[in-house]
Structures are given as structure tokens and as C-alpha cells.
Image (cartoon, grey):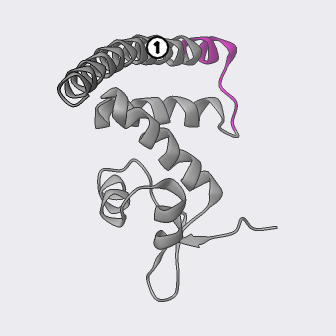
Amino acid sequence: MAERQMQIGEVAERTGLSLRTIRHYEEVGLVIPSARSKGGFRLYTETDVDRLMVIRRMKPLDFSLEEMRDLLAIVDRITADDAPTAEERERLHERLDSYRKVADARCETLRAQLMAAEDFAATLRRRLNAQNP
């Protein structure tokens, strides 16, 4: 049975990405629509949506387009029909783990920034409350 296909508007709604952003990701080769309709409309599958969500999750962690492309290539190779050799699989997992470590470190940085921002907002609230009893 064929995978259900969605037009770009539905994909944008499901991923929270703009049409322009999805088209840009196609232009740079990160996500290519699985098909085109007879009228030329882009058609995406659930696999394409999953790929877009990986990209969306990488974006706030400041991964570059090249890093996104590399990570997606790693995942594609790990899950390919022609299974990688044990040696290749080990190298791929090491590369994937290096991305995980970078993501973990960047998340920690974001948590620290959020704590500082929340502290600042609380300071402002206290000052406002002190002036308006």
C-alpha cells in the first residue's frame, strides 16, 4: 500500500514551518518532495514530514545547513535498504553520537540562557511591583 501523500500546505501546518522555508529546504537539497502531482504540486509523505521535523529541531540549536545535510545523510545510510557493513555502521553511529553530544551541549547552553532571562524578567517584575504597591 502506498504512503499517503500531502500537499505543501498540510505539511507546513503539521510541521509549523512556512511554505517558503519548506521550499528553501528543497532548494538546498535537505528535503525533496517524494512526488509531484499531475498539476506540478509538491507531494510529501510521512517520511518527508519526519525529515522536516529533524531539521526543525536542529534549527534552534544553530546547526548549519551543511551539518543538517550531514546528519540526514548519516540517518539515511543507517536506515538504507542495503544495510551498511558492521564497520561502516560503527563509524556512522560514532558520527551520530558526536551530533548528539553537540546537541546536548547546546541544550545546556540554552537552559543557562533561559535561566538568566527568567531571572531578568523576575527582577523587572519585582521592580514594577515595588513601584506600584
* 69 versus 23 height, above or below: above
Return the residue nearer the eye: 131 or 4.
131
Give the position of the N terminus as an image quadrant: bottom right
Does the magenta segment cover residue 85?
A: yes
Q: Is residue 44 on the magenta stretch?
A: no
> Which quarter of the rendered picture does the C terminus lie within?
top left
Q: Is the residue 2 above or below the residue 94 in the image? A: below
Amino acid at pointer 1? Asp
Q: Percent x, y for residue 111?
A: 40, 16
**Residue sitting at x 43%, y 41%:** 55
Does residue 114 sit above or below 15 in this rendering? above
Residue located 34% across and 13% down the image: 109
- Residue at the spot 63% in from the left edge and 18% down from the top edge: 89
Residue 50: image location, x then y, percent: 58, 47
Q: Which residues are magenta?
A: 82-91
Estimate how packed mark 1 is, as few (under 14), some (14 to 19) or many (20 or more) residues with alpha carbons within 10 Å: few
The percent position of residue 43, horizontal first and vertical second, equals 53, 71
Among the 4 quarters of the image, the one containing residue 87? top right
Q: Nearer the viewer, residue 78 or 24?
A: 24
Extreme-right residue of the structure: 1
Residue at the farthest left position: 131
Residue 121 relative to residue 36: left or right: left
Q: Mark 1 highlights which residue?
A: 104
Q: Is residue 102 left or right of residue 54?
A: left
Which quadrant would residue 34 be assigned to in this image? bottom right
Residue 129 image point, x, y percent: 26, 26
Residue 84 vs residue 120: left or right?
right
From the viewer's perspective, tell me whether residue 47 is left or right of residue 23: right
> Residue at the location (37% across, 16% down)?
106
Give the overall secondary structure of the magenta segment.
helix
